[in-house]
Amino acid sequence: MAMIKSPAVLLLAMVVVVVGELQRFDHAVKSDGSVRFLVVGDWGRRGLYNQSHVAYQMGKVGEKMDVDFIISTGDNFYDSGLVDVDDPAFYESFTNVYTAPSLQKQWYSVLGNHDYRGNALAQLSPVLTQRDNKWLCLRSYMLHAGNTEFFFVDTTPFQDKYFTETEHNYDWRGVLPRANYIANLLKDVDIALKASSAKWKIVIGHHTIFSAGDHGNTQELVNQLLPILKANDVNLYINGHDHCLQRISSPDSKLQFLTSGGGSKAWRGNTNPWNRNEMKFYYDGQGFMAGEITHDKINLAFYDIFGNILHKWSESDQYVYSGSSSL
Ligand SMILES: *[C@@H]1O[C@H](CO)[C@@H](O)[C@H](O)[C@H]1NC(C)=O
């Protein structure tokens, strides 16, 4: 149907102004409105610790699914982020590792705590996007794709211990004064979520909210971010930080807590006990997550380095579903 500039389009333009504190990107979706993506976290180790194997399987699954983009949950470069925009680690751990044709799509990344140990501004620099045009990393932003909105949140500044520990230095340029930064960020995320009319809302951050892994829960996010996610009907919170693959469900809401932090070094071997009704899947090893969002359904799958599906999960907005899934 040929459209005059509809009120919806104008309204959308206005909404962008209102939520303007968080930069918003739009990613075109497939003709049937579906969106497909991969999620990997905690990866940059110059191909070592099975990073190359994870990358290879991401390439295969990415091709089979015809993914639209890739999400990085942070800790992009170990051990201490990038030194500057000329750091060869950018090529050695990113460009030269994720070489499969299906991975030459837009990457949407956040910073992890290890990225803050280096030059955090280097990863945010447009210079890196000029060097490898699939790279994009910002602190906090939104991504609109079909009936889904992704909200990327810079979670490192929330964690108290990074501001008191002495064994590591963090690059807090642009973050201080911290209390203002956090208060503004929480307000912006809340406003953006409230303004969103997307059917599915997905929030992404590096740090866990809930996790049975080595780092465990991030109490600062449980206290400060979780209430906002619950109040705004968020479907998924996706993080890295713990080097595992994990799905935890909520006892009191539809919110699912997903960890995709298996991009390289894993196998910590110290999983903590968790309520069995909530812990739906835990894998203490390498791999990644794949997502497909259709008109009325979210489909997720976790893969190991051999390309095996370890766990699948779907949520439908209808009781009866008869569509097909590429997963
Ligand atoms: C690589 O993956 C295999 C299979 O999961 C695992 O047995 C091995 O320990 C991993 N290697 C490293 C260095 O993590």
Image: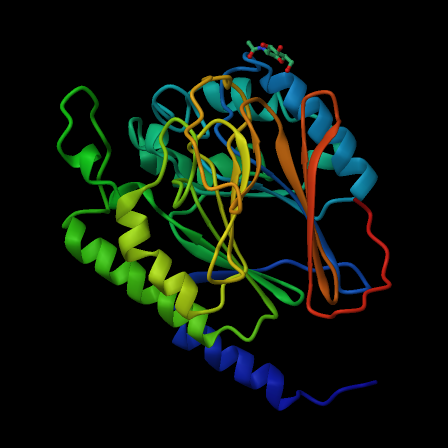
Identify the residue shown where x is 51% and y is 31%: 261
Nearest the eye: 128 or 150: 150
Residue nearest the viewer, comparing 119 with 168: 168
| Occupied quadrant, residue 282 | top right
Q: Number of numbered discs present?
A: 0
Colour mapping used in the image = rainbow
Residue 168 is situated, as x and y percent measured from the top left of the image, at 21, 22
Mark yes or no: residue 147 visible: yes
Ligand 1 is found in the corner quadrant, namely top right
Rendered-image quadrant of the N terminus = bottom right
Q: In the image, 139: left or right of 92? A: left
Q: Residue at x 22, y 47 (%)?
A: 175
Q: Residue at x 24, y 34 (%)?
A: 171
Give the percent coordinates (x, y) of residue 72: 53, 38
Which is more toward the observer, 255 or 291?
255
Q: Position of residue 226 (x, y in %)?
A: 36, 57
Residue 149 drawn above or below residue 238: below
In the image: residue 188, left or right of residue 159: right
Instruction: Using the rendered image of the protein, determine whether residue 21 is visible from the camera's viewpoint.
Output: no
**21 is higher (above) or lower (below) than 242:** below
In the picture, the quarter occupied by the C terminus is top right
Rendering coords of residue 94 (x, y %): 55, 25
As drawn, the residue found furthest toward the front would be 276
